[in-house]
Each structure stands twice: as C-alpha cells, then as structure tokens.
Amino acid sequence: MLTLGALGVVFGDIGTSPLYTMQAVFASGRVSASAADVYGVVSLVVWTLTLVVSLKYVTFVMRADSDGEGGMMALIARVHGLGLTGRWSRAVLVAAGLFGVSLFLGDGMITPAISVLSAVEGVEIAAPGLKSAVMPIALVILTALFAVQRFGTSMLGRCFGPVMATWFSVLGLLGALQLAAHPAILRAVSPTYALEFLARRPGIAFIALGAVVLAVTGAEALYADMGHFGRPAIRRAWFWLVFPALSLNYLGQGSLILQTPGAVASPFYLLAPHWGRTPLVVLATAATVIASQALISGTFSLAREAYHLGYLPRLSIVHTSDDQIGQVYVPAINTLLFVAVVGIVLGFGSAQHLASAYGLAVTGTFVITSVLFLVIARRSLGWTARRTAAVAAVLLTVDVTLFAANLHKLIAGGWLPLSIGLGAFAVMTTWHRGVAILNANRARDTGPLQAYVDALATLQPPLLRLRGTAVFLSADKAAAPLAFREHVEHLHALHEVVVILAVVTEQRAHVPIAERIVVDSLGRPDDHIVRLTARYGFKDRVDVPACLCVAAGHGLVDDVANPLYFVSRTSLKRTPAPGMRQWRKRLFVLTARNAADPVEYFALPDDRVVILGARTSV
C-alpha cells in the first residue's frame, strides 16, 4: 500500500515527462531524425534517468534524512547540526540550501502549467479541429485544481495511486508494443551511443541536454516525500514500475521517430493507435493533475517548514486531515501559485514554449543538493575521503553538465523561474536576518525574564493576584514578553498562575511528545510563575492548548482549565540603525504586515485571547 501511495504522490511530475521531453528535444530542428541522432538522444535520456534518479537520489541522497524526512529543508537541518566552521562555513551551506529551495519554488510554478498544457494539447492530435480550445480547457482545469485545495486532498489522494499505476502501465505498454514491431532501438540502452553523440556533434548534443533534463524534472520529489512513505516503498516503486515504464516509453518514442520522422511533432500521442488517443488524452490529463497536485501540496509543506525554521513569517495554515500531519492548506501560497501559473500559461501559450523556460532552476537545485549531501556524507554518514571524492566526481559532473546545458535558456525564458527564485531567496534571508535583529531589540527593550520576575517579587505593595491562569506567549524564551510587561504596568496585577510560553522549533523534523515540554520555575516556585518551552520539529503541528494539557497532565504546571492567552501585536518602526540595508528593512516590514494571525496559527480559542499592542524598532 505504501508503494502504491508513493506512485500517486511521489512520481507524478517525473511520470508525466514523456508527454513533452522527446518533443522538446527535436523541436529546435537542430537534432535530426537520423538514426545516429535518435540513438544518441534516447541513450542520453535513459542514462540521465539512471544517473540522476537511480544513482543519485534513490541510492545516495535518500540516506541523508532528518528523522526520516527528506527534502532541501531536511538537508539544511542536517547542515545546522554539523558544527561546521571556516572553509566549510555553515552559513554558506545554509544559504546555498535556501537558494536551492528558492529555485525549486521558481521551477515549481512552471510544473502545473507545462504538465496540464502538454496533456491537453493531445486534443490537437485526437481532434485537430479543437486546437483553439486547448488554452481555455487548460485554464479551466488549473482553476478547478487550485479551487479545491481548501477542501484537502485526502479523498482525492485515495485514487492517486491506482490512477498513476494505470498511467505507468500504459506508458510501458505503448513503448513495448512499438519495440515489439521495431526492436532495433534497444541498442540505445548502451551508454556508448550517448557518448558517441556527444563526441560527434558536441554543440548540438549539449543543446539537446537542455531538453533531455525535462526527463528528470520531479526527481527532487523522491527525496522530499520520503517522510510520507519511507525509503523502501519509494525505491520499490521506482525500480519495479516507474523506471522500467519510463525507459520503455522513451525507447518506444525513439523507435517511432526512426520509423516515421514526422512523429517528432508529438511522439508520445502518436505511439497510440488512432482509436486510443482520446482515452489517452483523458488519462494524461488526470496524470498531470495529480502531478500538479503533488507539487502544490509539496509547496504548502515547504512553506510551513520554512516558517518553522525561521525563514518565512507566520502563515495561515489549515490542517485538512486529522490523521495525516503533512496534509495542509496554505491560502496565501495557493493564491500566489494560482496567479503565477495562470500568468505563465497565458504568457507562454504552449508546452513547447514553456520547455524553453524549464530546466535552469531545477538543475541548479540538483547541484546544490549534491554539494550539501556530499558534505553531510563526509561529516555525518562516516564516508571516507576517497569514497566521497569518487561519488562527487560522478554526481557533480552530471549535475554541472546539465546545469551548463540549460544556461542558453536564460534569455528564452529561464529568467522567469530564476527571477522567482531570487525573489524568494531575498524574502527568506531578509526575514531570517530581520527576526534576529527584532529579537535582539526586544530583549534590549524588555530585559531578561529572570531579572524581571525577581524584581516583581520585591515590589511593595505586592501585585494583586487575580483568579485563574494567564498564558503569555513569548518570541524569546530568555526575554520578558512584551505582553507580560504591559499587563503588569497597566493593571498592576497578575493571575494566580502565570505561564510564560515560548514555542521553539528545533532543527529536526519531529519532536516526540515525551520530549516536547520543558518547564522552569524561574527559581521561585511559590510565586506560581513558570516558564514553559514547547519544542516542535519543523514538520510538527503547533497546538498551544494541547501543549498545556500535556504539561498539566504530567504535573509540570498548575491547573490550566480555561486560561486567558495574552499575545503581543508588535508595530515595527524602521530606523537608520545598522544591521540591514534600508531596502531589506522595507521588505521585512512589508512581509511582517502580511503575517498570519497568531490566534489561528497557535490554535488559540478566540474567546480566550487578549491582544496587547507594542512598538519595536528594526
């Protein structure tokens, strides 16, 4: 069942690449339909799949997990724990990882557009008279896809696996039928044809690599979704069905082009008999919707992880499943993706034009993933220097070659995902730096929590103690919360039980419930003021009331029945103080204004929350 589930979620993007990869290779007209070129291209595709997916991701990179979770954020979390200094500066590697995340987001906005367009364009083959309907149909499908995100994917997810299993079976069957009639193309499985193509026509082969990389788009998903299904299930799905089906289909397309050179216009759909093309369009559309859904869900999860690790502001997150923690809906990200995808579809107009924009960002992500993995393998997985160097020679040669082969796309459209990536990188790094400055200024304004509590104990007359429990949320567990100070100064009173609660996200995916709560009485157990630290992983769901119940159940805090929650709402004032450039301060303030309501994010009851305003400089 895990393997079937992995088929539906993990392999959607890479599984729909046969729709447009071979077509994109021959679209420029520079690669001919001659036997030598076709053999070379098919060999390049098969061996790119082998080296990038089978060797790099499935065999090596999936070993570098963070509590069973994968993805670029997991690599960043692992790097944080290595204690690197000097030449292996942790800051440089983390910045590289963030840039990889940003590039993933940039290329990710193209995935739904190119996938759905390439599937719907099959209508032109099945019914040429409907060519003008391709764009409207694609826009309707994409609009419906983004509209249903708020309902969650649990029900739809149940049919993902069977649909994709059918899809891969059809891919393999179409390729096998063509090979049965014309099996000569099987010689292309030998890497010598790829090497001969590169040596005989280096310039053309290099440009062809820029389109060949489309065959491995979505390879990051194998690693990113590892936490949902586990390494064994993903490996089984890849080697038992996905890899054989993709290879057979690409070989079949190559065989068809050799037999019918005109098939380069749409080699995938022309593999099917005429009567089967309309059902194939329907199945391909379903497969591309699933591929797009997996990308959208992955972006939601990535945004949540980035917030927990301190690289994005607080986001409004809706958990769409009570059973699966990974099923979330982020309204702001959904709207951003929808607007971007529709704009891309309208701007580029066809899958062929989109192919010219696709590849530069994803190959940049490949390079960064390899670098981070090799550092982790050497420092954390116990690899010897010789083994690390040998694997690095293979992985980086392939990744850098694919990246270089896509540089020519920069002007043709590659600037788009790169620009989106640079924008996302600027937001994440600015937010991370701004929060550090903001916390330092807050600590300066409010002072240490311990000293403030000690001072309260010496007040004469003592503070009036009100009935009930008050919970003050704190951004910094060492500093006195702004709401705490404002409450004391304005009311000259405190509740009978006071909990200073700081939510801390650790550099790991999950924190077990048994390790979640840390309580400190601040040295004065008789005043019933305690500091509670709630520790979460970057994939855990934050629920403050549930956390308090756990603490009370273990006798760590006094009764927390119906507490009042006090939250600070900070107004930011931009100053000329050093620390960040002014444009970054403007960006930080603008981003902070769009942060989600803390009441919703921390799952606080609306009728038990008191919000106190404060002003802090940045």
Image (cartoon, grey):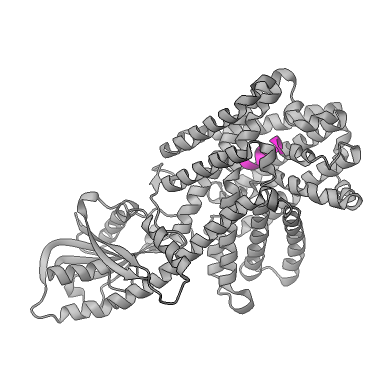
The answer to whether 334 is drawn above or below residue 61 in the figure is above
| Nearer the observer, 340 or 566 | 340
Numbered-mark total: 0
Can you see residue 282?
no
Stretch of the chain drawn in magenta: 13-20
- From the image, which quarter does the N terminus lie in? top right
Can you see residue 494?
yes
Instruction: Tell me residue 467's x, y (percent).
Output: 11, 62
| Nearer the observer, 284 or 430 | 430
Q: Is residue 366 magenta?
A: no
Q: Is residue 488 left or right of residue 49?
A: left
Q: Is residue 395 left or right of residue 444?
A: right
Instruction: Tell me residue 19's x, y (percent).
Output: 69, 35
- From the image, which quarter does the C terminus lie in? bottom left
At 81% from the left and 51% from the top, the residue drawn is: 206
Instruction: Tell me residue 214's x, y (percent).
Output: 70, 44
Q: Is residue 16 magenta?
A: yes
The answer to whether 438 is drawn above or below residue 167 in the figure is below
Query: Farthest residue in the top direction?
Result: 275
At 68% from the left and 25% from the top, the residue drawn is: 124
At 76% from the left and 26% from the top, the residue drawn is: 270
